[in-house]
Amino acid sequence: MGAAAAFYLDRSADFRPAIDQIIDRFSPTPEVLEGGRDRLGAAVLAEHTMLPCFARNPEFQDNPPSWLERRQLGPLSSQKEPLRDFPDLSKMPGLVKIEQILSSGGNQRHHCAATRVGEHWFVTANHCVLMRGTSAVVVDMVVIAPQNDVMQEDAVIVPVTGAVCNRSWYSDTGKFDDDIALLYIEDVSRLSDVKIATMDSAAAPLPVSEYEDAYFAGWGKNGENRFLQGGPLTISHIGGAFIMANNGGEFSPCVGDSGGPLYVGRDGQPRLVGVLSSVTMDACPPYDLAFYVRLKTYDVWLRNVMKLCEQGGKFVCKPNRSGV
């Protein structure tokens, strides 16, 4: 986390060429499945810098694990209060919590956030899916529909079907370049209240002047991984791939908010412009800088993933059995 300030210094507005060739969203989907199977071919994945990085164990379909039940979130008798008022969820379309299940009993978890950007698609940080540098094995992954308090009895818990990460992330430079991923959820019938967010795009990016009204949210350390917390952010720098926020030591994003959204207001309508990649202080407080992946830079990559990895209503960007 603390490396963010160091690696940010070499960023410039024009550091990155066009990421990929754009696939026309209105054109027929190319025949790219390997041997007629339900898996996208390795050559196509590599061409578009896509890395299949999670696929749910099919055994869980017939035998739903205990962590899909409300009681796994914690005792209902736990009477805690958040340190701050809850943010206004109506201003945060698409926001959900992610929990990676890291143990067979479901007690060990990794916390992040994501934002819905398509009928079945949710954007998050790459490191929320692939936890490089750790020995943790991801048993399962779920999203929890937006709740001020995820320990409420009516919390909606839905399993993630699969995920696609940017293949260029975490190169041998050791930097958090390309820290972006997409989650796919096949059955979204219980997520009807989660609206699809409007993303900033390369074709019509928001002007810098619009970033004066920026705000964040998440269920990280600020809210003990339980309570939704968020607030306004001061944007101090907008680069080609990253957006840097600096609230001058005041309340800001923290550990566990990774993958969460950076919204800006436009004509009273929230626009999703970034995904939290890192913060430079883990204690929270003190608070320091927050770095967001700038979504307009990855607009082509995101659309390519959503175009190619969902075919016939099915997720086809699956890891090979030998690994990702």
Image (spheres, helix red, strand yellow):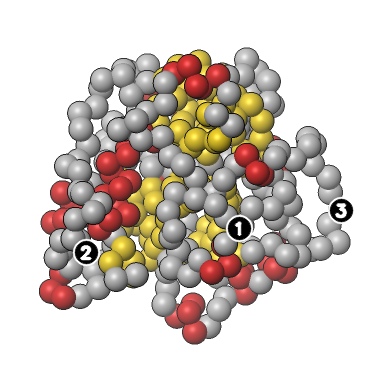
Choose mark 3 or mark 1, whichever is in front. 1
Q: Position of residue 90 (x, y in %)?
A: 65, 44
**Residue 34 visible to an observer of this rendering:** yes
Locate residue 129 relative to residue 319 in the image: left or right.
right
Q: Amino acid at mark 3?
A: Gln
Quarter of the image holding residue 59?
bottom left
Residue 88, numbered circle: none
Residue 193, numbered circle: 1
Residues packed near mark 1 inside 10 Å, few (<14), some (14 to 19) or many (20 plus)? few
Choose mark 3 or mark 2, whichever is in front. 2
Q: Is residue 12 above or below residue 162?
A: above
| Of residues 102 and 244, the one drawn nearer to the viewer in this rendering | 244
Q: Residue furthest bottom?
A: 62
Q: Amino acid at mark 2?
A: Leu
Q: Which residue is mark 3?
A: 79
Whether pointer 3 and pointer 2 mark residues with C-beta atoms closer than 8 Å, the reply is no
| Of residues 316 and 69, the one drawn nearer to the viewer in this rendering | 316
Which circle's residue, 3 or 1, is located before the other in the chain?
3
Q: Which residue is mark 2?
A: 40
| Of residues 119 and 250, the one drawn nearer to the viewer in this rendering | 119
Judged from the image, the secondary structure of the residue bearing numbered disc 2 is loop
Quarter of the image holding residue 168?
top left
Q: Position of residue 248 (x, y in %)?
A: 62, 15
The alpha-carbon separation of the residues under discs 3 and 1 comes to 26 Å
Which circle's residue, 2 or 1, is located before the other in the chain?
2
Choose mark 2 or mark 1, whichever is in front. 1
**Residue 1 visible to an observer of this rendering:** no
Judged from the image, the secondary structure of the residue bearing numbered disc 3 is loop
Residue drawn at point x = 66 percent, y = 44 percent: 89
Residues packed near mark 3 inside 10 Å, few (<14), some (14 to 19) or many (20 plus)? few
